[in-house]
Amino acid sequence: RDGHSKTMVAPLTTVLLRHIPSKFGDDEVAQFVHDHGLDEQDISSITLPTDPQSKKNKGYAFIDCVSEEAALKAHSILRGHRHAGTLSKKITQTEWANCPGSPQKHQSSTLR
């Protein structure tokens, strides 16, 4: 033994997409993801947390990908975009999420 323990690292498959316009719903986020080159072969689900009182999204979504390769693609191609057709000046950012959104707390949709 070399004195070092080996730990298994789970593949990164969930991307946190930030700076989503608050008026976007599930369909608009799914369309944004699709318009930038991702589809049901890449994405298993999209979780869009919403505020229970205002019913608006919280400005971010969890993109659950089918593989680490698809997640790397999503992480790369979904960042740095403005939302065409809106007044929003927000520019999307992506981060690695430690875990996907909890279905008990967040509204979830699958990519159409």
Image (tube, rainbow, N blue to C red):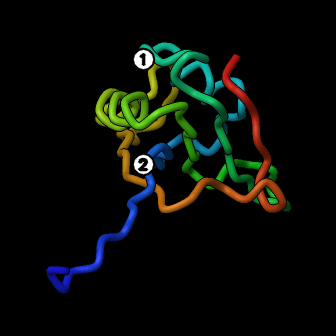
Q: Position of residue 41 (x, y in %)?
A: 56, 16
Lower sequence index among marks 1 and 2:
2
CA distance for labels 1 and 2:
23 Å
**On the rendered image, what quadrant is the N terminus found in?**
bottom left
Report whether 71 appears left or right of 53.
Answer: left
Question: As drawn, which residue projects farthest toward the front?
Answer: 1
Q: Is residue 4 above or below residue 108?
A: below
Residue under the image location 47 percent in, 37 percent down? 88
Residue under the image location 55 percent in, 49 percent down? 60
Q: Is residue 3 above or below residue 71?
A: below
Q: Is residue 13 above or below residue 80?
A: below
Q: Position of residue 44 (x, y in %)?
A: 63, 30
Taking depth in this image into account, of 41 and 33 the one nearest to the observer is 41
- Disc 1 versus disc 2: nearer the observer: 2
Report whether 26 appears left or right of 90.
Answer: right
Looking at the rendering, which quadrant does residue 105 occupy? Answer: bottom right
**On the rendered image, what quadrant is the C terminus found in?**
top right
Looking at the rendering, which quadrant does residue 27 occupy? Answer: top right
Query: Element type at marker 1?
Result: loop
Query: Element type at marker 2?
Result: loop
- In this figure, which residue is indicated by the disc labeled 2? 11
Rendered image: mark on residue 36? 1
Say whether residue 19 is visible.
no
Dot 2 alpha-carbon crowd within 10 angstroms: few under 14, some 14 to 19, many 20 or more: few
Q: Which residue type carries mark 1?
A: His
